[in-house]
Structures are given as structure tokens and as C-alpha cells.
Amino acid sequence: MTIRVLDILEETMADGPGLRTSIYCAGCAHHCEGCHNPQSWDFKGGKDMEVEKLLELIKSDEFSNVTFSGGDPFYQAEAFTELARRIKEETKKTIWCYTGFTIEEIRENPKMAPMLDYLDVLVDGPFVLALRDTQLHFRGSSNQRIIHLREEKEEEIPGTVKVIPFR
Ligand code: SF4
């Protein structure tokens, strides 16, 4: 199983708390006005990488947690679900995932919803230029929510939105 990957950032601090390995996938059809990364829209951009290879890279960094970004990982939900499942089964790492879909849309989609079982945090919703706020941590516009999906929450981050539990 492969994921179309545009870029991988190791030990980044921009995509969630602490050090993280960020997987930037190719492809996004949300086409938000003012998107920070329009070069990621092309589903044929980047290159195919085996889930196994990505897992190896993630596990090779003892300290970094993981972020899925893009593009939008939920357009490749099946492969990202497999990667997320393996990360949760084989490591103690947390996973943040960015998406232009809302959690409500994801939960209604049988192909996308299974990934939620393996994510720790979902940053959801499209970027809305009119709601852009440079003071926000880890997201671009105030409609986007940082949603904790699991009981074991990472430490609260000053300045982020209130945690919104859904189970
Ligand atoms: S969802 Fe993210 S990557 Fe996709 S168009 Fe919107 S801001 Fe850009």
C-alpha cells in the first residue's frame, strides 16, 4: 500500500506540540482561497511511498511524534489509516492530522471515518481567508478546530482552542 507523498519534515515544531515527523501528502480538492500550500493540490505531485517505508522512517526517530498534513490526508484515507494503525500498534507516538474536511463530514464517510480510531488530534475544516488569524497556534483560521479524539490528551497548549471531546 502506498501514499502519495510531497514532502517529509523531520523534527519539525510547526505542526503540533513538540518535535514531530510531518508527512505532507500530495492532493487536495478543497482549493481554499489563500491556501498556504497550493502546490500541494496536485494529486500527481510528489512520489509514491510504501506505508512500510514511512513507518520505518517514523520509527527511526525515537523522540518525534507524528503529523499527517498535505494536501489532505483524507483523500488517501485507506493508506493513511493503515499507517496510523501501525503507528499506534507498534509505537507510543501520538498522531495529529490536518484536514480540510470537518469531523462531521469525516464521520459520515465510511472510507474516511476509520482513521479517526487511530488519531490523537484532528485539526479540521478548510482555511477561510476571512477568518485568518495569525495569533492562532497550529491552525490558520478561527473556524478550524483542534479536536482531541482520545482520552490520553497531550498537555494543554497555551493559546489553542478549548479541547472539544467527542466521545
Ligand atoms: S485544505 Fe489545506 S491544503 Fe487544502 S486547499 Fe485548504 S488550506 Fe490548502
Image: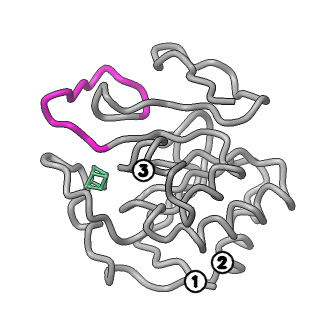
Q: Quickly name the residue at label 2.
A: 51
- Left or right side of 73 for 156: right
Q: Residue at x 69, y 60 (%)?
A: 84
Q: Which residues are magenta?
A: 126-138
Q: Residue at x 67, y 41 (%)?
A: 120
- Left or right side of 97 for 61: right
**Label 3: element kind:** loop
Q: Residues within 10 Å of mark 2 (few under 14, many from 20)?
A: some
Is the CB atom of the residue marked by disc 3 within 8 angstroms of ligand 1's nearest atom?
A: yes
Q: Residue at x 31, y 64 (%)?
A: 28
The quadrant where residue 45 appears:
bottom left
The disc, 1 or 2, on the residue closer to the chain's N-terminal end is: 1
Q: Quickly name the residue at label 1.
A: 2
Q: Quadrant of the C terminus?
A: top right
Say which amino acid is labelled 1.
Thr
- Left or right side of 74 for 78: right
- Separation of residues labelled 2 and 3 (CA atoms): 19 Å
Give above or below for 111 relative to 32. Answer: below
The disc, 3 or 1, on the residue closer to the chain's N-terminal end is: 1
- State which mark lies toward you, 2 or 3: 3
**Label 2: element kind:** helix
Q: Is residue 133 magenta?
A: yes
- Left or right side of 70 for 86: right
- Separation of residues labelled 3 and 1 (CA atoms): 19 Å
For residue 99, which numbered disc appears in the image?
Answer: 3
The main secondary structure of the magenta stretch is loop
In the image, 58 versus 152, the foreground residue is 152
Q: Does the residue at mark 1 contact the one at mark 2 (Cβ under 8 Å)?
A: yes
Q: Residue at x 56, y 51 (%)?
A: 67
- Separation of residues labelled 1 and 2 (CA atoms): 5 Å
